[in-house]
Amino acid sequence: MAYQENEKGFVETMKKFTIVMLILIGIYLALPIFATALYAFSTEWNKTILPEGLTFEWIRTLFQDARFIEAFGRSVLLSGSAVFISILFIVPAIFVIVLYFPALEKWFQASVVMVYAFPGIILSVGIIRFYSGTSLPMILAVTGVYVISVLPFMYQGTRNSLRNVQGRQLMDAAELLGASKMDAFRKVLLPSVYPGLFVASLLSFSVLFGEFVLINLVVGSRFETVQIYLMAKLSTSGHIASAIVFVYIVLMGILTLVMATLTKKAKGMRHA
Amino acid sequence: MSKVVLKDVHKQYKDAHVLSGIDMNIEDGEFVTLLGPSGCGKSTILRILSGLTEATGGNVMIDGKDMKKVPPKNRQVGMVFQSYALFPNMTVYENVAFGLKMRKQPVNEIAEHVEKMINLVGLKEKKEAFPHELSGGQQQRVALARSLVVRPKVLLLDEPLSALDAQIRKHLQVELRTIQRELKMTMILVTHDQEEAMTVSDRIFVMNQGKIAQEGTPFEIYTQPKTEFVANFIGRYNVFTKEQIENLLGGKMTILAAKYAIRPESIQFQPQTSSYPIRAIAGDSIMNGNVIRTTFHADNKQFTMEQLHHQSSAFEKGTEYQLFVEPKDVIALS
């Protein structure tokens, strides 16, 4: 009896400790974001605890700057293209391997691990040395590396979705009902794994959108993305830099919200 | 006519022989069950019949036509999967209508057939529901309706009831048989549940290690098992060696065989004309629904006796009893 009471007391203490730790970590992580966002809307914030006034001036200035809009467009274009190419070429390969050649999955998994194994700096040096002497524009080389670097997200997302819906059986069932392989893929399999695939794509997009090392070292300011623009603004205006970070956080927040909604939807389908 | 013939069908994965020399003749409108333990190759036969898996050797004929070069979509073979494989992005109505749409049937005909089939399986109220909103039994009905609506020549059922609880499973077994009789459709069921096989089948193929161990009507399979495997798999037969049975029954066996089997329910407490007497000591009794199963020991051999609950004699553990078995109930196994 005493042992049970002791154990109960220990569990309660641990629970409280966990809650306190979570709150502290939450504050530690949220405080810089909150401060940056607040700085993006402050008139002056040098000698006081809180900003002296609030303004939309920095956000307005940011969106009036053609360089920012162009950089934003380039980031969207670069990340979007890489994800699009990945969907077009890598995802079908994942479908075929997972559904019809599962024995080959081990090679795919090895490739995924290799993507994690190479740091950005090694990749950059490798790309510069290998492609600088060729006629291939460096931006295309970077796009190619981006396509490969999202492989882990696309592979995990697609494979998990296929397993959740028992993709092979869906294909078999559709074919036995008279569908061609293409019809079965287009009308049954793709809509069934769509939420998972979309989440993987959004995740890949957000990772690429925040990428700085590779693009800066390989292409540099010749192809200014949001991250490079941010680096440039850090030394000129703290308010503008904060406004960029704020816009970036809002964009990522929207993407996370969409992903969470779709993941929830995908879970609903799992029981079928 | 939808006669199914398998002739010397083989399937091999690398060095593993999954199927060896399968011969089957299934008549039009027959309900056949492939019964066997997991991994015996029964589902592989269904996949070969449907065209989803290619046989390593042999022939598959449906309606006298060789299926070797016919793709799954053109075989007119329906299949209900163990996990139902309902399309999660479609409602019940859309799932059932899918096959007809793929066959490019007119919209009004699709609507008519789908409504009829949904009514047949009793899901009228659920036609706008998505698969994840249905119970296991309802999902199974949708899978059945989806396969039946395209009027396949042969319907293959790959353990479709195994994921359901006992009560619903029993109810659907009867329903399945009723629908099959109503539509006069050739159906091939795969199961490892011998009770299910007995309930629904016209004929049973018992399979073991990629081969057909025995085929026959449920009555033939149950009362005349040919091998020890079938005797053990299909019922709770008591299997004895020649020496054991002669010691037990106190006489020489007229039919020579390696082993002999006696059904637990054919061992009687009351003597019949010309029955063998058995002297044995009672062990534990277990009640299994309406049947009482008692273990006996004689000459270092254990066997069981089953009696219907209402006619059962109470056996006292450790007491010796005189039991009886008729010669016709001693089955010689090959």
Image: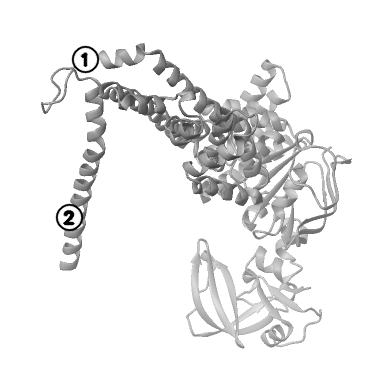
Point out the residue furthest to the front here: A133
Tell which tag, 1 or 2, sits nearer the viewer.
1
Residue appearing at x 31%, y 13% in the figure:
A61
Residue B296 drawn at (x, y percent): 56, 80
Mark 1 vs 2: CB contact within 8 A: no
Residue B241 drawn at (x, y percent): 71, 81
- Disc 2 crowd rating (10 Å Cα; few below 14, some 14-19, many 20+) is few
Task: Judge from the rendering whether residue B118 lies leftward or rightward of residue A208; answer left or right.
Answer: right
Query: Judging from the image, what secondary structure is the residue with disc 2 in?
Result: helix
The amino acid sitting under disc 2 is Thr
Residue A240 drawn at (x, y percent): 29, 21
Q: Nearer the viewer, residue A174 or B284?
A: A174
Query: Which badge, 1 or 2, comes first in the chain's sequence?
Result: 2
Q: Nearer the viewer, residue B267 or B173?
A: B173
Label 1 – label 2 distance at C-alpha? 45 Å
The amino acid sitting under disc 1 is Thr
Residue position marked by numbered label 2 in the rendering: A13
Q: Quadrant of the N terminus of chain A?
A: bottom left
Q: Compared with residue A159, is residue A262 higher up or lower down, i.e. above or below?
A: above
Residue position marked by numbered label 1 in the rendering: A55
Same chain? Circles 1 and 2: yes
Query: Judging from the image, what secondary structure is the residue with disc 1 in?
Result: loop
The chain under label 1 reads A
